[in-house]
Image (spheres, rainbow, N blue to C red):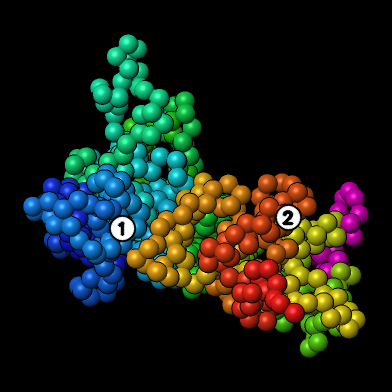
Amino acid sequence: MIVDALGSRIRIDFAASLDRSQRESLRAAWAGASARAQTSTKAQTSTGDDAAELVISAGIADGPATATSPASTERADVAAADTATLASALSARVTLAAIERQRGRLLMLHACGLVTADGAVLAFVGPSGRGKTTAARALGSRYGYVSDETIAVDASGTVLPYRKPLSVIEPASAAATDPATGTMTSADAAVRPKRQLAPSALGLLPLPDASLRLGGIILLDRRPGAGDPRVEEVPLAEAIAAIVPEASYFAELPRPLRYLATLIERSGGVRRVVYGEADHLAAAVPELLTAHSEPEGWEPVDLDARTGLDARTDLEAAEGYRRGAALDAIAVGPELLVLSDGVVHVLSGIGPQLWLRAGSGASETRLLASVVELHGLPPHGDAAEAVSEAIARLLAVGLLEALGPADGSTDAPASRWRRAEHVAAVDSGDRVVVLDLADPASATPQALAGSAAAIWRAIGTDADGTGGRDTEAIVAHVAGSYAVEPAAVRADVEAFLRELRARALVREIDTDARELDDTITSGGADA
């Protein structure tokens, strides 16, 4: 069976451990995404040729031999003890594989998508638990179902569908209900079964006979108890800051902020829909389809660090500050958006001037003078104190780096960390699911939540060639996420970094970007 997933064609092979009914169940779940089912539409479903680009095998773990399904010694890429668990694991594996294959090529939003008859796709963006699958089910009987998981968009605005099965919680069964009270038993309440159902099984409409294009990006804001849905226009800077955490491998796109800003501009801006129940969303769709904002206007920022006030050849000989590594930056009115280590920072007030004028080196005195020249003296307080505080905040998030005098120091280079190249990740907001593809046959998704997810996000991908992020920057990032002092999280962060290294999910490198010797990083070399 070959399926179209985010522009990739993936072949799902069934292991001998699956009997006929199990195979048919999986085929039925993926019917909406099958390459054969989508050849009748004008929608672009693949970025390559018609041959399957990737093969994933699925089977029952330790399945018993039967007359129609003899025992097999083969090892499936995805295996589980029962069909329901296998279907869920297969869906996750196909999704991760498709996202991994398109990293750096497409904008991949964590969103559900519905399409009109003429091919305009509305992407409803939100983290896990925000109601994307529920929204897809509520709207899919009126508009074509594109995906409930990921919306992929190329630089021209073309959307590549991923009509994966929907994960649906089964209603409580009679067998799982206490006959005395009529309520669910504790065991069933703790683990509600989910089924992977094809969109057609839920009454969702197919794709139209039209090319798919991005018709709008909508931020989902579900508020229990809210009345009629309310549509709000979202300013460009705020929209980008909200969208980037819900985009897979965003930092690996070419000029990612410019890529996203251009798509937003072409699709008529970003809206937020505030609603109480998914059934109410249909009333807001006509407005979402017709409401378009006047372009706010934005400009790319020159990342050439030589624009600093005190730029000089021997940077280490200068006291002051310089810009930290940044992958992209754009100016939106008086605000400056900077993408660094996979995080979008929105600078306002005196922040843009400090970052822009720091360049490859500027003293605090010169930075203060440039701020006063542009903004004037503050009506209250001391200008020098305000600049010092702003510099400290920029240092904490890595947007500025301190320069010190050449003092002959021979301190050992600080360790830096980056994600391993063979690790794929899907960030769903409340957690990050990672998959080590170094050995695809034994790859198992691993979920990181809470502070573990925050640490993973802080590490970065080395997409900008900076050699990863140092321990101090990671500690500062995590501390900032929880509004605590770095000392409160340092030990936990350092311990989890070592754990990730032991699991081969990250690499520890020195400032010259050389891999550290495993014997040293795991406990010290023998004398």
Asked if residue 61 shows in the view, the reply is: yes
**Picture coordinates of residue 147 (x, y %)?**
31, 51
Task: Identify the disc placed on residue 78.
Answer: 1
**Picture coordinates of residue 416 (x, y %)?**
66, 71
Asked if residue 118 shows in the view, the reply is: no
Q: Between tags 2 and 1, which lies in front?
A: 1
Q: Is residue 198 above or below residue 70?
A: above
The stretch in magenta equals 367-385
Amino acid under disc 2: Arg
Q: Residues within 10 Å of mark 1 (few under 14, many from 20)?
A: many
Q: Residues within 10 Å of mark 2 (few under 14, many from 20)?
A: some
User: Under tag 1, what secondary structure?
Assistant: strand
Count every numbered label the image shows and give the total: 2
Of residues 520 and 217, the one drawn nearer to the viewer in this rendering? 520
Please tell me whether residue 490 belongs to the stretch shown in magenta. Answer: no
Q: In which quarter of the image is residue 154?
A: bottom left
For image coordinates 68% across by 68% down, the residue present is 523
Residue ID for mark 2: 490
Q: From this viewpoint, which residue is outermost toward the bottom?
A: 313
Whether residue 5 sits left or right of residue 223 in the image: it is left
User: Under tag 2, what secondary structure?
Assistant: helix
Label 2 – label 1 distance at C-alpha: 37 Å
Q: Is residue 466 above or below residue 66?
A: below
**Picture coordinates of residue 94 (x, y %)?**
32, 59
Instruction: Tell me the quarter of the image containing the C terminus.
Output: bottom right
Q: From this viewpoint, which residue is outermost toward the front?
A: 527
Whether residue 300 sits left or right of residue 363 in the image: it is left
